[in-house]
């Protein structure tokens, strides 16, 4: 038996997880105010001094005093973290130094102006993101913010004050906050502070008083701040009640719930509840309890209209399933701390109520305990305009079921009539006939509905009386025993048939819920396993198309520069526009008319098209893909049936779309993260290249500059030396430029090789000659296998490879050590090696020596770290390989090149 007081497992789990998440991070306290100048920062500093007196390690991250003497006096007594100095155009901006705070790791940080936008170049674009990182590092944070900066309130504030709110923070910060302290001040006192210059300078104060700080605006903002705080406290109370298994309600605030059904009169109940909730300034919700009883198509359509009306009136819709509507309503009411339930006045007679199991209103009144019940009558105008309150029961069974019931009963009666009149079965009595007919009726209940069973029970009873009970062929019953038997027969047949039919209805109900659960599981499973955006879209199109028998088109949002889309941005809140063409995975392509409907749905973040009240002549319904306010796209659903989705199908589709939207957002965020990582790496490489190239260019330029000053008027010997210095500087610059050009060509794929047979000894000799100066202090040993064949290569490119390797050996080897160049044929490859007897390579760094800009630690300054990377690219462009290793005896490094003797070009 289901316990109506048992807490909802999902709600309980969410509350417990929220509490556990708070325990695993730092504590956040928000000082909330209605406007600047109410004293949020001052109150925050006073609380910080109390914590400081308790021995807590408190630091000031950012506190804006606005040159108020009393605020500056409070700041002076708390350790201050130096701010970051960020050059920006012609000025220097000061920002929060999050790295310094994380390194110091205090217990509590004061971070003023939560909605502040950070200067370009710092880690996070918004200050609230700094707060989140501090909390994740288990550091407590005190912060201050005005109510207009919360995203859910920004539009209302703009409507009230006429001033656009540019800096906002997500409302999710309210959920993770451990404490919210409202700093309240009457508008008159705030205006007085403004006039006294305690908020802004006198010139700005007058302007503010005539605009944002009008008394009406401040009153509205004050109410908004009070309500926001009250909502937060109410949510805390509901979480507490869930965790502590408190059934409720606790009457801390009125909370209304209206029970809706597939009746047209539910529309009046919904509007009445909305008006009452508005007057009471209370939240409200609508609940529909789904029972095993099957609804007609007309009832399903009316229920869908009722639910749509609730959502248009900004109400929350909860759909639950229960065999008993009363228990379902009370369970939802207790879980949501409802104080008042609104239901319709019963329109059935007392007899009808008794036959249907009792009045729902009477049972609610008896079982509601602390919840008040409001009973609202139907509109006379509605009842007089064709909506009948007392309607005959709808026939859910098809005509063929009635024909089957009559036919089977008639056949059973004929067979029994023949048997009872036959001499072959003399012992068969009319009482046994009653048991046989009763068995037939019970068996029929497994295949037909409740209405046909009633017909079968009544017809079989009449025929049994007429054909079998003495006196036969009359409806007269002569004995009391036969009267009781006949009455019991009818009652038992009706009860048995009704119970069997109810069990079949419950079975269909369970099967329907199982089917929806399996469909949702399949969608969630496939979307969760998708590794790319294409896989997410493919899964979405397949699952929605098969579940709802529809063709699907998915159009995603993209930046205006990358889109050929037509239309406005998403409600003015985002620069994204809707793509003009659907994703390739879609199963239909909208034409220009359909595309305009999709764009409207995207721009207004509302469903439009077929079966809606907006642009209903479209062939498909277009639903925004969004889970956090802004849409990431639109999904078009073109059903192959000319019927709108029933309520449970619409609810399932909404769940599907929420899953898809989250998955699309996930993949888009992943792509943005990847792009950001690539951009960050590019910026790092750019900085490294700029620094390396600057140092490398500076040295030969200095040599050239010095040589040029001594060239004029010097003796021939000095002139020869200067000319050699100039030549060396030019060679160094040429080598640097060659490496840069080669790297650019390799990465762009535009490097073209001129392959021709070339002499290996000539290649080695030319390469050694080009680094003759660098090798002057080394003994160069050239060991070439005799009779080496000509090898296909680009001589200039391979010469650069050898020059880079020889230059590397000369620079990183001590003076006097040997540098050995060897060449030999091994199988179908030429093996070239450059080895030295220097310190060798750190073993851990050998896999990285060919990375761009990589330079081993503890090496002399100079070099760009491009030479080996370029060499690797050029060798691989020839179809060869290059590797590095340490020599096994007496130390040193060796670089080995393997080139194919036949031309194999990879680029």
Image (tube, helix red, strand yellow):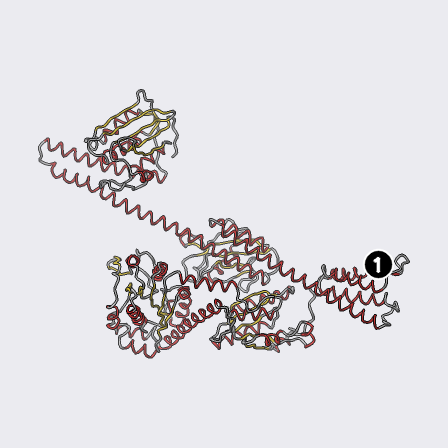
- Figure check: 460 above or below 891: below
Where in the figure is residue 822, as x and y percent of width and height? 29, 26
Query: In this view of the protein, which residue sits in the foreground, 154 or 479?
Result: 479
Query: In this view of the protein, which residue sits in the foreground, 844 or 294?
Result: 844
Q: Residue at x 26, y 77 (%)?
A: 196
Q: Residue at x 68, y 64 (%)?
A: 502
- Figure check: 516 above or below 33: above
Q: Return the residue at label 1.
A: 415
User: To which quarter of the image does residue 849 belong?
Assistant: top left
Q: Residue furthest right?
A: 423
Quadrant containing the C terminus in the rendered view = top left
Q: Secondary structure at mark 1?
A: helix
Q: Residue at x 62, y 70 (%)?
A: 263
- Figure check: 501 above or below 69: above
Where in the figure is residue 333, as x and y percent of width and height? 54, 71
Q: Residue furthest top?
A: 787
Mark 1, Cα crowd under 10 Å, few <14 / some 14-19 / many 20+, is: few
Quadrant containing the N terminus in the rendered view = bottom right
């Amino acid at each position: 038996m289901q316990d109506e007081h048992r807490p909802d497992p999902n709600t309980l789990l969410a509350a417990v997880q929220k509490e556990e998440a708070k325990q695993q991070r730092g504590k956040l306290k928000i000082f909330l105010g209605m406007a600047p100048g109410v004293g949020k920062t001052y109150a925050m500093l006073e609380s910080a001094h109390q914590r400081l007196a308790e021995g807590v390690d408190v630091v000031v991250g950012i506190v804006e005093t606005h040159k108020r003497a009393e605020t500056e006096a409070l700041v002076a007594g708390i350790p201050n973290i130096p701010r970051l100095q960020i050059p920006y155009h012609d000025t220097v901006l000061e920002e929060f130094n999050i790295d310094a705070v994380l390194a110091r790791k205090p217990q509590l940080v004061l971070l003023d102006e939560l909605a502040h936008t950070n200067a370009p170049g710092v880690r996070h674009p918004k200050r609230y993101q700094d707060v989140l990182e501090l909390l994740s590092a288990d550091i407590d944070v005190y912060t201050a913010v005005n109510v207009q900066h919360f995203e859910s309130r920004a539009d209302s504030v703009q409507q009230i004050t006429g001033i656009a709110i540019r800096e906002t923070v997500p409302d999710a910060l309210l959920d993770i906050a451990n404490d919210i302290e409202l700093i309240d001040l009457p508008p008159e006192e705030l205006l007085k502070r403004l006039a006294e210059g305690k908020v802004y300078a006198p010139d700005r104060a007058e302007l503010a008083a005539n605009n944002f700080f009008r008394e009406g605006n401040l009153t509205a903002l004050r109410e908004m701040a009070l309500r926001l705080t009250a909502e937060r406290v109410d949510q805390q109370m509901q979480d507490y009640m869930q965790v502590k298994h408190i059934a409720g309600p606790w009457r801390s605030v009125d909370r209304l719930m209206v029970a809706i059904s597939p009746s047209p009169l539910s529309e009046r109940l919904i509007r009445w509840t909305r008006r009452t909730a508005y007057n009471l300034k209370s939240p409200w919700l609508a609940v529909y309890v789904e029972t095993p009883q099957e609804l007609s198509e007309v009832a399903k359509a009316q229920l869908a209209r009722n639910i749509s009306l609730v959502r248009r009136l900004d109400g929350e819709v909860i759909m639950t399933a229960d065999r008993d509507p009363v228990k379902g309503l009370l369970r939802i009411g207790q879980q949501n701390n409802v104080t008042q339930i609104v239901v319709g006045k019963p329109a059935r007679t007392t007899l009808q109520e008794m036959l249907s199991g009792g009045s729902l209103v009477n049972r609610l009144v008896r079982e509601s305990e602390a919840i008040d019940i409001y009973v609202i009558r139907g509109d006379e105008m509605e009842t007089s305009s064709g909506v009948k309150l007392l309607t005959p029961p709808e026939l859910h069974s098809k005509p063929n079921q009635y024909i089957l019931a009559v036919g089977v009963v008639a056949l059973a009666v004929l067979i029994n009539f023949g048997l009872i009149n036959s001499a072959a079965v003399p012992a068969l009595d009319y009482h046994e006939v009653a048991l046989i007919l009763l068995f037939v009726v019970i068996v029929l209940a497994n295949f037909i509905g409740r209405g046909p069973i009633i017909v079968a029970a009544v017809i079989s009873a009449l025929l049994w009386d007429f054909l079998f009970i003495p006196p036969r062929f009359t409806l007269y019953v002569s004995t009391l025993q036969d009267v009781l038997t006949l009455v019991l027969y009818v009652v038992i047949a009706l009860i048995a048939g009704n119970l069997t039919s109810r069990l079949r209805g419950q079975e269909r109900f369970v099967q329907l819920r199982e089917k929806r659960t399996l469909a949702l599981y399949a969608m969630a499973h496939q979307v969760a396993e998708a590794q790319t955006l294409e896989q997410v879209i493919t899964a979405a199109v397949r699952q929605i198309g098969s579940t709802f028998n529809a063709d699907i088109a998915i159009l995603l949002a993209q930046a205006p520069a990358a889109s050929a889309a037509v239309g406005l941005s998403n409600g003015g809140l985002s620069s994204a526009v809707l793509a003009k063409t659907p994703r390739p995975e879609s199963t239909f392509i909208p034409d220009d008319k359909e595309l305009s409907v999709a764009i409207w749905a995207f721009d207004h973040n509302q469903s439009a098209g077929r079966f809606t009240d907006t642009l209903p002549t479209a062939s498909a319904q277009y639903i925004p893909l969004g889970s956090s306010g802004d849409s990431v796209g639109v999904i078009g659903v073109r059903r192959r049936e000319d019927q709108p989705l029933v309520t449970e199908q619409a609810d399932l589709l909404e769940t599907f779309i929420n899953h898809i939207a989250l998955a699309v957002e996930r993949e888009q965020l992943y792509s943005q993260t990847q792009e950001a990582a690539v951009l960050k790496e590019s910026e790092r490489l750019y900085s490294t290249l700029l620094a390396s190239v600057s140092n490398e260019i500076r040295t030969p330029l200095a040599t050239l500059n010095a040589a040029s000053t001594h060239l004029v008027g010097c003796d021939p010997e000095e002139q020869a030396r200067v000319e050699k210095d100039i030549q060396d500087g030019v060679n160094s610059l040429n080598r640097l430029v060659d490496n840069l050009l080669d790297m650019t060509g390799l990465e762009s794929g535009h490097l073209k090789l001129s392959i021709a047979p070339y002499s290996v000894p000539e290649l080695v000799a030319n390469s050694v000659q080009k680094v003759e100066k660098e090798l002057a202090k080394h003994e160069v040993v050239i060991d070439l296998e005799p009779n080496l064949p000509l090898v296909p290569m680009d001589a200039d490119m391979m010469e650069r490879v050898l020059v880079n390797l020889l230059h590397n050996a000369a620079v990183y080897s001590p003076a006097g050590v040997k540098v050995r160049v060897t060449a030999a044929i091994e199988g179908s490859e030429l093996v070239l090696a450059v080895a030295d007897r220097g310190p060798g390579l750190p073993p851990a760094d050998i896999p990285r020596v060919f990375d761009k800009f990589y330079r081993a630690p503890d090496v002399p300054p100079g070099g760009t770290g491009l030479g080996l990377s370029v060499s690797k690219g050029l060798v691989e462009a020839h179809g060869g390989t290059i590797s590095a290793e340490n020599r096994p005896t007496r130390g040193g490094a060796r670089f080995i090149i393997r080139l194919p003797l036949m031309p194999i070009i990879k680029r």
